[in-house]
Amino acid sequence: MTLTRATSSLPADVEQLITDTIGCCVAAHRALSPGPTEGAYGRACGIELSLRGIPFETERAVAVHYRNQLVSQQRIDLFVDRRLILEIESVERIHPVHVAQTVSYMRARASERAS
């Protein structure tokens, strides 16, 4: 079987950041195996990112506004190199609600940057 890679419009440095971050996540998951909490996986991923010299922030607050008023703060699990949102889930499957949560982080971050 041959695997093909989709063409990306992202810059090469972002693609490399994504590849390196996925590598960190895979290393953490292989070492911990299924079962630990999201917090444990997040800390393990943070250790891997640090070991590889990749900057990140944990629990990065992002403001959510409605009609120009702050309505809440959301927290990004890991914000990698100020360019990549990493949402840690310790679940058997990713469900649409997980995707929606991450998309809402992206929207909040985008509106934060625009203001």
Image: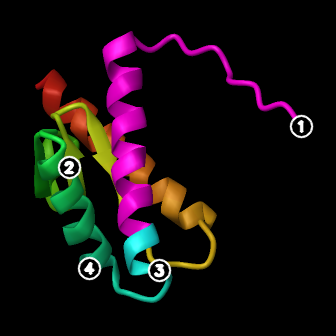
Mark 1–mark 3 contact, CB under 8 Å? no
Q: Amino acid at mark 1?
A: Met
Res. 88 in view: no
Find numbered disc 2 in the image and state the secondary structure of the residue it sits on.
Answer: helix
- Around disc 1, counting alpha carbons within 10 Å, would you say few (fewer than 14), some (14 to 19), or many (20 or more)? few
Query: Element under label 4?
Result: helix
Disc 3 designates what residue?
33
Please give the name of the residue rendered at 61% of the width and 61% of the height, measured from the top-left corner: 96
Check disc 4 and report the residue beneath it.
Answer: 40
For image coordinates 46% across by 69% down, the residue present is 30
- The quadrant of the image that shows the N terminus is top right
* Residue 49 numbered tag: 2
Residue 1 numbered mark, or none: 1
Say whether disc 4 or disc 3 marks the residue closer to the N-terminus: 3
The local crowd at label 4, few if under 14, some if 14 to 19, many if 20 or more residues have their Cα within 10 Å, is some
Q: CA distance from mark 2 to mark 1?
A: 32 Å
The spot of residue 62 in percent (x, y) is 15, 50
Say how many tags the image has.
4
**Start-end of magenta stretch:** 1-29
- Name the residue: 27% across, 61% down: 45
Q: Tell me the distance, in whole angstroms, between the alpha carbons under discs 3 and 2.
A: 18 Å
How packed mark 2 is, by other alpha carbons closer than 10 Å (few <14, some 14-19, many 20 or more), is: many
Answer with mark 4 or mark 2, whichever residue precedes in sequence.
4
Q: Position of residue 46 (x, y in %)?
A: 18, 59
Residue at 56% over, 15% down: 8
